[in-house]
């Protein structure tokens, strides 16, 4: 391996993980899947934790809707879910995942995202999906949208994501400036107003 190829290897880090969109079988009319970006992101994260190489579409749909049903029955809401509630309701309560291995970090900077990825950790971020400018979103894009950060390309300054908002979201790349600008924490509820912009992330460790 020549020196340039070695540079490329160390410049790009991507965690191996499977992908699902929030509507795996394109049933967007199901409100649980229309608003299923948080649940789909957790399904992907837990699949990574378990070392699963593939998420079958039928199984993904079943998991996403089951989580939404659980949230609605126990907590009264399944649509926009805040990072804190996602951690407690889904990771800890639903999946029984170790609370010490999933944490919400507030007031983050761009370097915090890169640092966690360099440690081999997975990140979930809440965003204003309109600011992501993803051409595969139905215009103008979702105001509240969760996605997974699984890698970073130092040379291109891009985050490598699994974005459940589109079937083309596996390994989708966003420029770091666009991604970070789009990060905006939102409360649990149905498109409740966001009173101030807060930069937060949810970090998942194996």
Image (cartoon, rainbow, N blue to C red):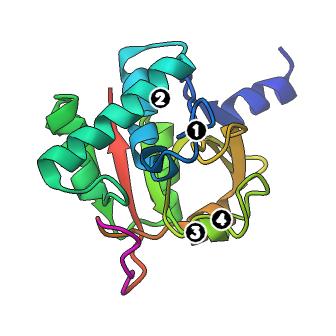
Q: Nearer the viewer, residue 32 or 89?
A: 32
Which residue is tagged 3?
182
Residue 174 appears at what percent x and percent y? 70, 54
The N terminus: image quadrant: top right
Residue 199 against residue 29 in the figure, above or below = below
Q: Residue at x 68, y 37 (%)?
A: 167
Q: Which type of secondary structure does the marked residue at label 3 adopt?
A: helix
Front position among marks 3 and 4: 4
Rate crowding at label 3 as few (under 14), some (14 to 19) or many (20 or more) other CA atoms within 10 Å.
many
Callout 3 touching callout 1 (CB < 8 Å): no
Magenta range is: 189-195
Q: Give the numbered dot on residue 27.
A: 1
Residue 91 against residue 157 in the figure, above or below = above
Q: Nearer the viewer, residue 189 or 102?
A: 189
Callout 1 touching callout 2 (CB < 8 Å): yes
Q: Give the numbered dot on residue 101.
A: none
Q: Mark 3 to mark 4: distance in Å? A: 12 Å
Q: Residue at x 70, y 42 (%)?
A: 172
Residue 9 appears at what percent x and percent y? 72, 27
Residue 185 appears at what percent x and percent y? 39, 68
Q: Is residue 193 magenta?
A: yes
Rate crowding at label 4 as few (under 14), some (14 to 19) or many (20 or more) other CA atoms within 10 Å.
some
Hey, which residue is sitting farthest bottom in the picture?
195
Which residue is tagged 4?
141
Q: Earlier in the sequence, mark 3 or mark 4?
A: 4
Which residue is tagged 2?
61
Q: Earlier in the sequence, mark 3 or mark 1?
A: 1
Hey, which residue is sitting farthest front in the picture?
29
The C terminus: image quadrant: top left
Q: Which type of secondary structure does the marked residue at label 4 adopt?
A: loop
Q: Residue at x 66, y 44 (%)?
A: 166
């Amino acid at each position: 391996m020549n020196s340039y190829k070695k540079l490329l290897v160390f410049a790009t880090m991507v965690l191996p993980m499977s992908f699902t969109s929030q509507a795996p079988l394109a049933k967007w009319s199901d409100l649980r899947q229309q608003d299923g970006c948080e649940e789909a992101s957790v399904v992907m994260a837990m699949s990574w934790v378990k070392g699963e190489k593939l998420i079958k579409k039928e199984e993904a749909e079943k998991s996403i809707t089951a989580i939404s049903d659980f949230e609605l029955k126990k907590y009264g809401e399944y649509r926009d879910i805040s990072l804190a509630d996602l951690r407690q309701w889904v990771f800890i309560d639903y999946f029984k995942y170790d609370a010490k291995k999933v944490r919400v970090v507030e007031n983050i900077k761009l370097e915090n995202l890169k640092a966690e990825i360099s440690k081999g950790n997975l990140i979930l971020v809440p965003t204003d999906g309109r600011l992501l400018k993803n051409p595969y979103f139905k215009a103008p894009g979702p105001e509240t949208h969760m996605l997974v950060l699984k890698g970073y390309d130092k040379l291109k300054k891009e985050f490598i994501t699994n974005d459940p908002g589109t079937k083309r979201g596996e390994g989708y790349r966003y420029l770091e400036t666009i991604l970070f600008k789009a990060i905006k924490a939102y409360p649990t509820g149905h498109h409740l107003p966001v009173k101030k912009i807060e930069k937060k992330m949810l970090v998942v460790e194996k």
